[in-house]
Amino acid sequence: MSNQEKTQEWGTKLGVILAVSGSAVGLGNFLRFPGQAAANGGGAFMIPYFIALLVLGIPIGWAEWTMGRYGGKKGFHSAPGIFGVVGRSRVMRYLGIIGVLVPLSVSFYYTYIEAWCLAYTFYYVTGNVPVLAGDAVAAQTQAASGFFSSVTGMAEHGVISQGSYATFLFWLATFGVNIWLVFRGISGGIEKFCSIAMPTMAVCAAIVLVRVLTLGTPDPANPDQSVINGLGYMWNPSWEALANPQTWLAAAGQIFFSLSVGFGVIINYASYMRRKSDVVLSGLTASATNELFEVSFGGLITLTASFVFLGLSGTIAAVSSGTFGLGFTTLPVVFAHMGPLGPFIGAVWFFMLFLAAITSSISMYQPALAFFQETLGWERLKATTLLVAICLIGSFPVMYFSKDAVFLSTLDDWVGTFMIFVLGALQIFCFSWLFGIDRGWREAHEGAHVRIPSFYKVVMKYIAPAYLTVVFVAFAFRNLPDWIRHVAEDPVRQLAMGLILGVTLLMVGCTMIGEKRWRELRMDLDGKEDAAR
Amino acid sequence: MTALGWLIMIGSLLFVWSLCGWCYYQMLTQKEAPIEEVEHFHSA
């Protein structure tokens, strides 16, 4: 790598926080969180949710931030390099490949979903969303569902062959912007963009929030469909849910995925921090920012707006339709009921989702770019070219095999869900047991102005790993048999698994080349230099 | 909306806003060169 690459670092302490927060804040904050809460006890959900935040999300996040900065001190910015030096073993180095596989593979479909958000923004701005204000709710829902299907290609394979070549153009633009931002570098690209995008996202969310909270009771014929009752649907507690283990699993899962720990992003971003940067406060601030968006906006906007216009039964149906159904079918119906301001609010909402998605997607490309530069010793342009080639190979089948989003959902199941649990578990184990909790504690507090409460040593060494293991085992028990059967029965899913395997093998090869390079450069790739401390 | 619902909603919002506010306040008022505490631990 050139000297210019070696000196890449964040410009300001706020910059890395906004970048990590941007990575974490995504569609899930606005669409997944409210659905999970409403389906698992409403307000009662917040108890296991906040417990999981304090016991699982924040401590694993601290471990990841600390590992990243430590790896950066040693000259490593890729997860294999960092895992190798922190875990002090070759086995951990190769397991660290998961830290590149996850973000890169998720980017194959995430950028496509991002393009949907951009497309919807465009269609709202140009008045081309075919959900008409005067129609009955059933007709509006059908129109919204049909529109979503045509934009995304859900009805048949090959979104372009269905005539939705516009979606491909939106993807091309989205992908191009992502690559351009990542190519511009940590400070000049990612940091600068997130510094603008995050406040803009907050303003957009605030506009929609104010509009929703001031809806009152728009339909006199349905006086129960009010904002207050809509908030009640989300926040009134059903305490019996706390006796159901599923509620605790759902809360832990939501926190884990919402904070983007175990995603391979924080560990890469933190590696560009200065040696004495405060990872304790940075990690806490990034988590807090994510929670602010999730609870304030996700918790107050989505289901409230749905309840006001669609009532209880419509909102229950919306919750059960999942993230895509809620975001892209239910909400367009809601916006159609908002009168003349509806299209404007719709445009603002989907533009906000686009910003949430792009700040996340650029964070997924950066770890892979750093990985190729670091292992192969390539300059930025050459590594970016390789990254683009791999992304084209990975993204095209997502767009082509679009019927029921089968390719997308396979990648999301195995890489975007299963592998994230694995990586999170590896990280906390590596930090607390291989690196050592005392050493990790000391490392975390280097440069820290805020002290982690001492009981967190026990949390990071025993409670968080145990909690994560329970969640992971329960998740695997519930889902893996069906997932495996689906793959066995469907050639398209098998192709997706083949893609994952191919990318993994490529990364193993790159890591082998990197190992050789790092030894020749006399880098401390096995973490032996500090081992005696 | 029930009283408990209000309590949970306002409590949750207060918690996340307070945590966020405290974090950004700490970050913006940090001095550049923190006092380094050297604590001697035995390696795990």
Image: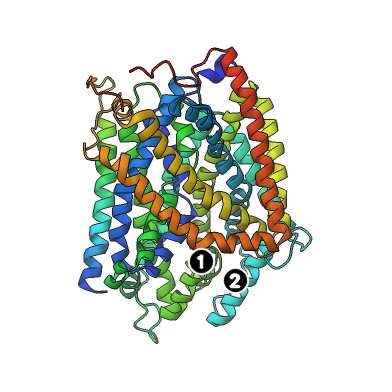
Tell me the tag on residue A390.
none
Q: Residue furthest bottom?
A: A221
Of the numbered discs 1 and 2, the one sitting upstream in the chain is 2
Q: Nearer the viewer, mark 1 or mark 2?
A: 1
Give percent across and percent down for residue A492. 72, 58
Viewer-proximal residue among A76 and A527: A527
A276 is higher (above) or lower (below) than A340: above
Residue A323 in the image: x percent, y percent?
Answer: 51, 63
- Please give the label number shown on residue A144: 2
Task: Looking at the picture, tell me which residue is in the foreground, A452 or A138.
Answer: A452
Mark 2 burial class by Cα count in 10 Å: few <14, some 14-19, many 20+: many
Image side of residue A499 versus residue A29, left or right: right
- On the question of residue A495 being in view, the answer is yes
Q: Nearer the viewer, residue B39 or A14?
A: B39
Q: Which residue is mark 1?
A: A322
How many other residues sit within 10 Å of disc 1, few (<14), some (14-19) or many (≥20)?
some
Q: Residue A455, image x and y in percent?
A: 22, 40
The residue that appears at 55% across and 63% down in the rendered structure is A324
* Element assignment for label 1: helix
Q: SS for tag 2?
A: helix
